[in-house]
Structure formats: structure tokens, C-alpha cells
Image (cartoon, coloured by chain):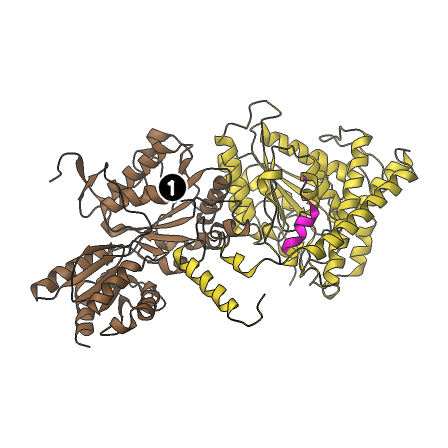
Amino acid sequence: MSTQSSGETPGFGPDLVEVFGPSQQDGGPELVQLLTPEGERVEHPDFSFDLGDDAILGFYRDMVLTRRIDTEATALQRHGELGIWAQLLGQEAAQIGAGRSLRPQDFVFPTYREHGVAWCKGVDPLDLLGLFRGVDQGSWDPADNNFGLYTIVIGAQTLHATGYAMGLQRDGVVGTGDPDRDAAVIAHFGDGASSQGDVNESFIFAASYNAPVVFFCQNNQWAISEPIERQTRIPLYQRALGFGFPGVRVDGNDVLATYAVTQAALQRARDGQGPTLVEAYTYRMGAHTTTDDPTRYRLSDDLERWKLKDPIARVKAYLRRNGVADDSFFADVQQEADDLGHRLREGCKALPDPQPLSMFDHVYSEMTEELVAQRDGFAAYLESFEGAH
Amino acid sequence: MATQGTQRITLAKGLNMGLRKAMEDDPKVLLMGEDVGKLGGVFRITDGLQKDFGEDRVIDSPLAESGIVGTAVGLALRGYRPVVEIQFDGFVYPAYDQIVCQVAKIQFRSQGKLKMPMVIRIPFGGGIGAVEHHSESPEAQFAHTPGLKVVACSNPVDGYWMIQQAIASDDPVIFLEPKRQYHADKADLDESATPEPLFTSRVVRAGTDATVLAYGPMVKSALAAAEAAATEGKSLEVIDLRTLSPLDMAPVYESVRRTGHAVVAHEAHVNLGMGAEIASRITEQCFYSLEAPVLRVGAFDTPYPPSRIEEDYLPDLDRILDAVDRSLEF
């Protein structure tokens, strides 16, 4: 069965364009790009990168360290120290570009893969590991860094983001013109989540209330084994139009473009101009998670083609070609990555298991009598074993 | 007749007054739902509130229940205390994922760093001659979910107090309102009174021969059954459970230990309904006091039937009395 449309139906307007054919292979003509895969700066009529080379050096460092968090965590899973890990390999530019465009007062609603955004918001990467090790379900305090807990149910957080943005409106911190006060929300999700009702409902609510939220979709082309063609018949960014707000497709492997586009979308939101959908067009170079085996469903050719668009390599090429960074810079970043990897490795192994009785805590703001009885009964049961503790 | 300092109100009015009071007391309280604004809700529970508190606090939402509850989660995370109205019981299911996976678990997931002070109001139960999906009793599905609290009011005075107490709770509360009672009976409300705590059950009629347990719409039926039984010389004690999660069983145990007989009545299906849990707990705690098995009276285990036969489907005074008789004759 063909997944492409065929033939025009009179009276129903123009036929759907071929959105997954050769013309779209690199993201299509609408793709916003400011740094080519070869590391050359290019202009775009609507978006520009207005920070200097120092910022690009910082982005490079962020991306290398984020990739190191990812590879280290993947290795920790292979060594049995984590139960599972959701890899972001290949999505570093999308996450750092988006993460660095946030102001401290902006709030992030992540999926379970936003390790790079967490890094930008100042969440200790060691804190991310607890969830995947099974010692907690997210140990950081969202209030510390305005970075919400990882959400595992696909797309559920987009509604939370929209509601939070409605709260910002009611708090009078939207459209005041004060850059230190005006705030926005960013909702992360993926191409698979774009099929969820919650995501579509969040688009409707955000549009209806003109909520200051940026919907940041990392289209990494795969929802576990299902290709993007299974989720949509039009480019995802175009869906926004149907909901009544703008959508932009940006090269998600281009950290400069992702920064520029997301920054502009966040500013629209902070200014009170409502939601935007940013589709960061990227590729999941690794597996969905460490339990996944992409060789069962996709061709290695595909991966090889995307490796040529590696988000880190192009920044490195730019920095080298233009003499912005020398060998010592790259060596320093490498050393910092090694140190971070070492810290994560040792820190992960030292994460303590929770006490069994702690499961009764925080079900409610105060433990109910029934739970007290269950906890006490379980404690007595544990005590009853000889040589317990 | 209302005495001085009191007023005679319906359940709908009690809830409306309670919502108004909660909004006056705390500017963070927001109402959200379908048609809750200008219309005042399809049952008029939010009548006049948007006019007085504005569109930012009484929010007409798009017709999407998951969207309503999911955005309310975000509002709660921002420090608001959203009260959402699900228009009818059978429409809560699109929001079920948000309620069970998010609302119920966020406090636990965050180890108490995040609170979820949300009230989800659901008009529930049948008897109004409605079409499909408008008469259901889904309470057990929520009482089964750790992290949620579930309460059901049965009368106008409780409606006034319980909605305010639920809004003040830092835990998410599923708030069940017996829709067939909204505009039925009136009662005297004394706003200066001190209400009982929210998560408590209450003996609403003292008796000695058997204990009848009910909540929501069945409290009225249970009281009517007790009245009828009295004419036959049988003394029934009636307990309004009021809270379904957590259950407040102490008054129940105390009663059953005296009477030796217990009948649980609800409009929900019998199979795995609240009555099953209550019967099990009574059996565990009152085993040597029981003169008969705990009996359950509820709807049959069928989908809600066409409304012309709903009175056959729903338990009523006679079915409660039938169960009481079977218990006493055991």
C-alpha cells in the first residue's frame, strides 16, 4: 500500500505535495539553516544568529559534554548500572540550541530525552541517571532550575506546559516589555508524540488562550521502529497553521539556526504573541533506548548519510576553519568531557537504593491511616526475618 | 423553614456558594470546564461566577477533557488551585490518562517537591432520564488509584462545606456530585457552623438492627429504606461514607460490631465496586461480630441501560430493604 497520495480530486483543492520524496530528504526548502554541514555560515532572510564566536565556542562545549553524558550513560547501561537509557546521540544541536535560547525565568517541560536541555538549565547530569537506574523517578527540584521532571507518557507534558503558560498569563509576566520579567514555556516532544491527542489538544488550548508556549518538536525521524511517514502526511511544522499559529522547520543539527529560531519563538511568546511550533529536523543516530535494536527496521545507509550532518562536527569545522579555536581549546573540552564521564561513572555507582519503606512517603501530602497501617505492617514483616538489616 | 442565620438551599446552590467562598478566600482558585462561564455549567453549578470573578478565573475550555485536566496540571504546577468540571461522568475517560498517570502521581514522582492541589468535579449517577454516558458511577476506578482522593457529597450542606475542603486540600480530589440531587431537596445551611473534616464518614441515622452504608445519591435511598423499615419495627443505622478514598472505616466498624449486619449500597456496578472493598474490610475487622455476610446492593454488571428501564437497573429503597431482610434472616 502506498503511503504517498496520488491524483488530484476535483473540488478538494491541490493534491498533497510529496512530502517524503527526494525533495524533502534534507528537510526541504523551508528548512532554516545558518551553518551548513560543512561548517559554513549562511544567511537566512528571516532568522539570524546574533551572538559572537564566544557563544559558538560555548555551544561546542555544551554539545561535546552532552554527547559525553549520553555515551557514558549508554555505557553504564551496558555495564548493568542503569536499567535503561534514552539516547540523544545526533540531537545535541537541537537540544543545546533550544536550551541556550531560554532565559532563567522560562520553564521547560521535557520528555525523557532532554539531557542536553537539562544541561543548559543547570541540572546535574548525575541527577538524570537516578530515574534510569531505578533509584528515583526524577530527583531534581523543578523549582531550582525551572526544568520540570521527565515525563514518560508520550505528549502528556505538552498540556502541562500549556497550563503553566496560562498561569504565566495570569501572573502578569507576559508582554510587559521587561526582559527580566516576561517569561515563556517550552514544551518538548517528538515526532511520535505529534500523533497523540494530548499534543493536538495542547495546540488547541494554546491557540485558544494565546498561551506563551513554544512547542519544540524534535523530529528525529523515528518513533522506536516507526518512521515519520507513519505519523504524518504533511511536514510537521505545517500542522501549526491548522491550529492557527506559526510553525517553522529548522535544521535541528544546526545549533546556530536552532538557537536563532527558538529564541525568536520564545520572544514571541514572552511578548504575548502566543504559541509557535518549532520542528527541529534531526535524526536519532542511536537507538530509541538501550533496549532497542534499530538494525531490525532501518538501513545503515540512512545513518551514514546523517553522520555527514553531525551537529558537532560542523561546529568544529567552523571553529577550525575560521581560527576561532585552536588545538588547546579542543583538548580542554575533551579533558572536561573525560572528567565529567568519570564523575558520572563513579557517581552513578554510588547512588544509593531507596529504603523500601520510603515508597509509602509522598503518595499524599500526609500519609493516610491506611497507608500508615500498611507501612507499619510491612516494617514488622521485614523485621520478622532473622538477620534482617 | 430556615431559622435565623441559616438559609434553605439545594445541593446545586450549596456547591455554587462553596465555590464562590473558596474563590473569595483564595485568589489562586480557578474554575475550568466546558460551559462553566456564561452558561454557568449545564447544571448551573458555576452560575454567576464568571460574571463576578472574570474570565481569567472562570475559564470556558475547549471541548477536550484531557486538555482540561492536563492544562489544569500545568496551572497547579504554577501555583494555582484549579477546580475542573467534567460535564458528565461518562465524559471523564478522555482525561483518564492525565488523571491516573499525572495528577495522581506527580506528588509521588517528585518525592513531595510538587503538589497537585486540584479538584475534579464530576456529576455522577443516574436517574435523570439521560442518554448513554450521562448516568455513570466511575468512582471505583479512581478510588483504586493511589495518589487520588475520592469523595462524594450527598446533601446541600455537605456540598457547601466539602467543596471548600476539597479545594483547600493539597492532594488531588475527585469530587463526585449526585446529579439527580442537584435541584431536588433543600436543607438548612448555617455558614457559621464548623464542618466535620472532609475525609470522614458520618452516622446519619442511628439504629440497632443492621447497618446500611451508602454515599452520594444512595444516601437518600438508604434513609428512606430506614424510614420504611422502622414502620416494620426494624431499626437501621445509616452511614454516609462521604469519603471513598481514603475510606473512613472506624465509624463503620463501630456500628457493625453493634448491629452484626451490614449492607453496602451504591449505584455503581457490584463487581469490584466500592462495596467489595468495604465488605472485605468489615469481614477482616468485624469477623466475630458478624451475624451474616456483608451484602452488596448495586447496579447490575451491565452497561447503563436505556433510561426507560434505568429504575430497574439502579438500586432503590426496595432493593436495599430486600438485602437488609436477607441479612437479618441469614
- Left or right: residue B207 versus residue B151 is left
- Left or right: residue B98 versus residue B197 is right
- Left or right: residue A129 versus residue B243 is right
- Left or right: residue B329 versus residue A168 is left
Q: Chain of mark 1?
A: B
Which quadrant of the figure contains the C terminus of chain B? bottom left
Residue where numbered disc 1 is placed = B168
Q: Which residues are magenta?
A: A122-131
* Residue visible at 62% across and 25% down in the picture: A179
Crowd around label 1: few <14 · some 14–19 · many ≥20 (10 Å): some
Q: Which residue is farthest bottom?
A: B330
Instruction: Using the image, determine if residue B87 lies above or below residue B47.
Output: below
Colour in which the image shows chain A:
yellow
Q: Which residue is farthest top?
A: A177
Viewer-closest of A200 and B203: B203
Locate residue A128, reporting x and y percent.
Answer: 66, 50
Amino acid type shown at disc 1? Ala
Colour in which the image shows chain B:
brown
Viewer-closest of B267 and A46: B267
* Residue visible at 16% across and 67% down in the picture: B209
Which quadrant of the figure contains the N terminus of chain B? top left
**Residue A129 is covered by the magenta coloring:** yes
Circle 1 — which element?
A: helix
Locate residue B160, reporting x and y percent.
Answer: 27, 42
* Residue visible at 56% across and 47% down in the picture: A157
Q: From this viewpoint, is residue A38 visible? A: yes
Locate residue B136, reporting x and y percent.
Answer: 33, 58
Locate residue B325, reporting x and y percent.
Answer: 16, 71
